[in-house]
Image (cartoon, grey):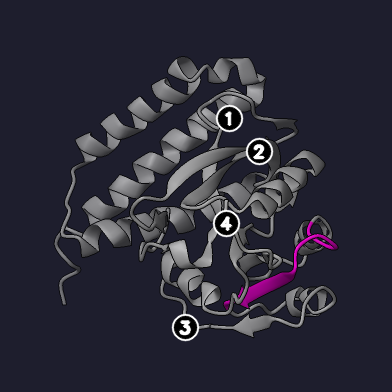
């Protein structure tokens, strides 16, 4: 624990775009206990900014989207507190998690960052298996001890050497998909970004490899990770995840095929 008696400060940070439906609930769960809220928008055309400005003066715009990792790095540059807590607009902090975060910041342990358990509500129920729960994500760290990777998608927190991870109590509630259309749009976007990332790194694949990955995804989620215990939603998630996995690899394969003749 640090020997300083100065108050340790905490910011919540978000990257957003067109989140007017979710943002109020998210920011309500932060109000009154974080020292600052930093929001970086990538070009919303709904009421996101108007909602955000009711909760914080620190709303910024960066519309030259270069991927999730670089967008988070840019947002962190606006954080001036000791700690940063990352949250997405479709997430809500529970009371138990809030208390755990405040305790961790108050204790201010040296060389320590924190992972948080995320619990997702999908198609009418909380998912408690399927490889979705527990779902530990690194979200709380000292600003000078971590940052995000450059990845286009599935970006990761990179901690300074010697910083250890501890788990906090309490769940971060994640309202991930509104409906099937929302899932398909969101998964298609992630699949494209994943294929972009693999292509940039010089990777190639085949349709047989795409099929194998999709089949393995279903088996892992529904059987190995006991998705069948999540009822019909567990089966649907396994099928949809297998489909998304196939699309991701199929997209990469298509890019290696001959181009349309002139």
Q: In this view, does 107 lie to the left or right of 221?
A: right
Name the residue carrying label 3. 64
User: Is residue 169 rendered magenta in the image?
Assistant: no
Distance between the alpha carbons at the discs numbered 3 and 2: 30 Å
CB-based contact (under 8 Å), mark 2 and mark 1: yes
- N-terminal of the pair, mark 4 or mark 1, is 4
Residue at horizontal 50 percent and vertical 52 percent from the top: 110
User: Is residue 37 rendered magenta in the image?
Assistant: yes
- N-terminal of the pair, mark 2 or mark 1, is 2
Residue at horizontal 23 percent and vertical 40 percent from the top: 207
SS for callout 2: strand
Residue at horizontal 75 percent and vertical 33 percent from the top: 124
Q: Where is residue 107 in the image (x, y as percent from the top left)?
A: 65, 49
- N-terminal of the pair, mark 4 or mark 2, is 4
Distance between the alpha carbons at the discs numbered 4 and 2: 35 Å
Q: Nearer the viewer, residue 206 or 79?
A: 79
Name the residue carrying label 1. 133
CB-based contact (under 8 Å), mark 4 and mark 3: no
Q: Which of 229 and 10 is in front in this view?
A: 10
- N-terminal of the pair, mark 3 or mark 1, is 3
- Give residue 120's mark: 2
Q: Is residue 243 visible?
A: yes
- N-terminal of the pair, mark 3 or mark 2, is 3
Distance between the alpha carbons at the discs numbered 4 and 3: 39 Å
Name the residue carrying label 4. 2
Q: Is residue 122 visible?
A: no
């Amino acid at each position: 624990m640090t020997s300083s008696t100065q108050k340790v400060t905490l910011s919540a940070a978000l990257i957003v775009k067109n989140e007017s439906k979710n943002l109020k609930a998210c920011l309500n769960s932060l109000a009154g206990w974080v020292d600052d809220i930093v929001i970086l928008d990538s070009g919303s055309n709904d009421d996101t900014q108007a909602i955000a400005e009711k909760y914080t003066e620190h709303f910024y715009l960066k519309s030259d989207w270069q991927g999730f990792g670089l967008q988070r790095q840019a947002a962190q540059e606006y954080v001036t507190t000791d700690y940063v807590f990352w949250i997405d607009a479709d997430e809500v902090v529970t009371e138990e998690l809030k208390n755990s975060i405040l305790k961790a910041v108050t204790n201010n342990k040296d060389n320590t960052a924190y992972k948080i358990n995320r619990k997702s509500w999908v198609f009418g129920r909380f998912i408690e298996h399927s490889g979705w729960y527990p779902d530990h994500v690194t979200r709380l760290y000292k600003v000078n001890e971590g940052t995000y990777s450059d990845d286009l998608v599935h970006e990761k927190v990179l901690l300074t050497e010697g910083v250890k991870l501890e788990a906090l109590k309490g769940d971060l509630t994640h309202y991930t998909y509104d409906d099937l259309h929302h899932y398909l749009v969101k998964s298609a976007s992630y699949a494209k970004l994943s294929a972009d990332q693999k292509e940039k790194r010089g990777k190639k694949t085949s349709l047989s490899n795409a099929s194998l990955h999709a089949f393995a995804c279903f088996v892992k989620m529904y059987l190995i990770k006991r998705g069948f215990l999540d009822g019909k939603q567990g089966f649907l998630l396994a099928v949809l995840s297998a489909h998304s996995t196939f699309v991701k690899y199929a997209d990469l394969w298509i890019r290696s095929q001959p181009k349309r003749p002139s």
